[in-house]
Image (spheres, rainbow, N blue to C red):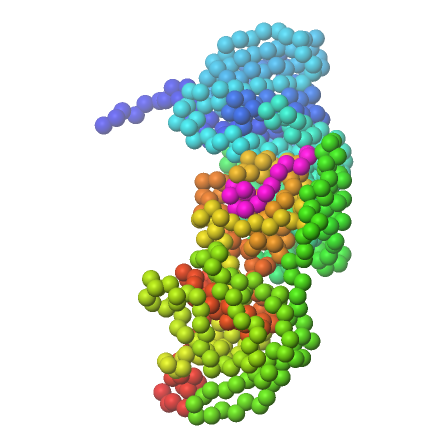
Amino acid sequence: MAKIHLLDNETINKIAAGEVIESPKSIVKELVENSIDAKADEIIVEIKNGGKSLVRISDNGKGINKDEVEDAFRRHCTSKIESSDDLNSLFTLGFRGEALASIAAVAHVEVITRTANDDYGIKMSIEGGEIKLKEDVGCPVGTTITVTELFYNVPARKKFLKSDASESGGVNEVVVSLALSKQNISFKYVNNGSVAFRTPKTTNLLNTISSLYDKDLYNSLLKVEYEENNIKINGYTTNLNYYRGNRKQQVVFVNDRFIKHKRINYFIEAAYNTLLPKNKYPACFLKIEIDPWLVDVNVHPAKTEVRFQNEEFILNEVKRAIYKSLNSKSIMKEVTNDIYLREEHRATKEPSNNFSVFERINKDKTSLYDGTDYSDSSNYDNIKFKEVSFTDNNTVDIFENAIEEESSNHKYADLCHMDIFEENDHKQLDYAEDEISINTPMQHTFLEHEEQTEQKIPELVVVGIVMDTYIICENPEKNQMFMIDQHAAHERINYEKFLGQYNKNQIIRQELLVPEVVNLSYDDFCTASNNMEIFENLGFSVENFGINAILINNVPTIFVDSNIKDVFFTILDSLKDSGKSNLNLLLDKIIKNACVKSVKAGDRLHISEVRALLDNLKQTENPYTCPHGRPVIIKMTKYEIEKMFERIQS
């Protein structure tokens, strides 16, 4: 049996460092918080290779006294608290006295610092917790700490570092959150030698937000001002015109400390209940001020987790603050002219070579749909109905002289020209028929494939459509009635069609009449730039278009009628959540969001379109549910129907 013994200091420091320093973003967070506590009003954050090669934090704060520099790198040495009582009234971001010691234990660290009382500063180098160099040096007032060779002596931890792009994203999130928490401090963020962004020294949070995020978010902000029951909540939240596919733009501070609290996010979203699409989330920037006695920040070494006294009450106050802001102005969604907006964005983001997006427009392009719109009930005036009389053989003609004059370009004319498995072998429907009888069985292309031995959907007779949503069909041979949701059916068809094109690397694209300019935050721009190949594989033609902007020229045909920006941000948010490692999950999520082009509930379909819809549904691998899991088809037997009418007694 192993003997109990005391660990040596080197091992203790490495273990302790693992709790505080997990990645480059942990180093940035701890060092910048020290700069803030040192009363700096200018902070420069510089990283290389995601922070794995270099992290450097420079500030113009008070500096460290020459005779205290060594103590600053000893564990549990701090100037911020004196006793445990101080934990109940913290006004500094740091207080543990662990950060510098933890960083020095697993990296090479160089510190250069000087106070206003000293004529010169001091430079000290530490490797693995051991001081290697200490000398006087000329330098300005403030502190610069450089960290290199992260985890050089902990290879097990080093191999778990993510890609440069992922680590950069983590650092960016930290710098953005700290800049938002302290708008009175000017931040400059340098990534691989390039200035990613800088924020102004200001008293207005809105100015800081405008320097960090895109114009769409900025223009959607609503002010939050709330003070009740000794709780003060200020900041901004977005109106109904702006939402994202994740919660990364929900930034919350408690007493100027950035925190992560899932229940706060939940209560923020509860204020938007039923106002935003499913699985879409608002952006918000909230500063909560409460008595320090009511919040415990000493939960985790990272200090981003907190506990509240009377948590339910505080969270409901957050919800009320958001709700009050939403109701202070009209929250009706605004309809804007996208072309004018794109021109405005282009003018502000256009590169110096005066390139015009309109040079790419094909002037011979025609409108996607230029035929009759059958969603207009007036177009049904030429369809005459006659009384329905039920006969013994249950065959009824409900249309008389159904079509006198008809265009082949309906709103959903693509239904009649879609073949999921054969790209170039479309079966054209005959639009010249003079009479449509509901007792005529449908013929479809799917059954011509001899290898198909079993029908997933039987031969059906179309009886009619109710509520402009549900197609009623009958299988006379088996005394069965079917109800088919036209929207769910078309979603399934579009889903499998795009999936098939993707798997064959044959996605059909369409050039946008007006290329879409998308303005991004620096973080989003980095994600998009690092994943151009994925956008290309998904059928999007995307290119960089100036500072923090991208240009979309082509999109898959399935997204032509969609809000292109919404689709783009769905992909972007999925990449940020899942990364490149789970492309199948990403693809599935993207296609499931491609509902705009699908026939909607309430859209009136011509009988030819109904038949084409059912034809194509038969060709799908799974015709029974839509991509979201809702049923497409509901079957009822004659027995079940007669039982409901009490023709059969149980």
Q: Is residue 440 above or below residue 67?
A: below
Quarter occupied by the N terminus: top left
Position of residue 66 measured from the top left corner of the image (x, y, whole percent): 62, 12
Q: Nearer the viewer, residue 168 or 135?
A: 168
Position of residue 307 measured from the top left corner of the image (x, y, whole percent): 55, 44
Whether residue 396 sits left or right of residue 159 in the image: it is: right
Find out whether residue 545 is within the magenta segment. Answer: yes
Whether residue 52 sits left or right of residue 621 in the image: it is: right
Q: How many marks?
A: 0
Q: Which residues are magenta?
A: 534-547
Position of residue 504 measured from the top left corner of the image (x, y, whole percent): 44, 48
Going 62% across and 48% down the picture, which residue do you hit? 511
Q: Can the viewer see residue 555?
A: yes
Location of residue 63 by image quarter:
top right
Going 65% across and 61% down the picture, which residue do you hit? 369
Going 52% across and 66% down the picture, which residue do you hit? 428
Quarter occupied by the C terminus: bottom left
Q: Can the viewer see residue 297?
A: no
Q: Nearer the viewer, residue 540 or 127?
A: 540
